[in-house]
Image (cartoon, grey):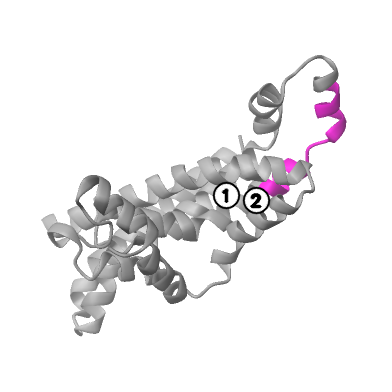
Amino acid sequence: MSDLVGWGLLSLRVAVLASIFGAAIAVPIAFVSARRRRWWISVMDAMLTVPLLLPPTVLGFALIVVLGRHGPIGWLVREVSGTTLLFTEAAAVIAATIVALPLIYLPAKSAFRAIDSELEDTARLWGASNWTLFWLISMPMARKGIIAGLVLGFARALGEFGATVMVLGIQGEQGKRTLPIAIWLDCSEGKYTDAWPAVLVLGLISVVVVSMYNRFMHL
């Protein structure tokens, strides 16, 4: 039971952090992408969308290359801190953030595009800066799309398996594993009865999150 609680808490931490980091990256870019047409915006748009199309194993392999001891980020972290990123909770968060990004980005972009541009033009005429426009006008009006993306991103991060198992391993630092990895490991060993508690916990969390989302959307 203690292992199940630990795996559940790890899964929740990873999903929450992935949602926060994903929103911090995706929402501002979605705001700019919905308003401007530049070549670099098209590049960013493609980079944020492509994880939705890539097989998780391909994404996991790319992360191993980048986060490994000889990869650019892994090498830098090792030189600065003397530690490695692979097989740590941080690696799991990075993997979950990347797979959640498209699901946060696309609804936010659609929500920003749906805002009447005349309202924003009027705000600019009254002296509103881009920062004020983003926080006080566009964000509140796009909030339902943003929250929808956050819910989708959280659910995707919570159930992420393919890329995570490649960068965290079957047992990461101090024997840590997420609930999806625990379920897969039990099933691969034929321990289907042992997998049930983790399955039920994941299902319960998903139902609670969707219920909270539906309640908010009807406010």
Tag of residue 109: none
Is 215 part of what is drawn in magenta?
A: no
Q: Which image quarter holds the C terminus?
A: top right
- 12 or 162, nearer to the observer: 162
Is 112 part of what is drawn in magenta?
A: yes
Q: Are marks 1 and 2 in contact (CB under 8 Å)?
A: yes
Residue 1 visible (yes or no): no
Image quadrant assignment for residue 69: bottom left
Q: Which residues are magenta?
A: 109-122
- The residue sitting at 79% across, 15% down in the picture is 127
Q: Which image quarter holds the N terminus?
A: bottom left
Q: Secondary structure at mark 1?
A: helix
Q: Amino acid at mark 1?
A: Gly
Question: Quick check: 66 left or right of 128?
Answer: left
- 49 or 157, nearer to the observer: 49
Image quadrant assignment for residue 35: top right
Mark 1 sits on what residue? Answer: 149
Quick one: label 1 or label 2, which is nearer the N terminus? 2
- The residue sitting at 31% across, 69% down in the picture is 165
Q: Amino acid at mark 2?
A: Pro
- 48 or 180, nearer to the observer: 48
Name the spot of residue 11 as percent of width and height, x first: 31, 55
Residue 186 visible (yes or no): yes
Mark 2 sits on what residue? Answer: 107
The answer to whether 108 is drawn above or below residue 75 in the figure is: above
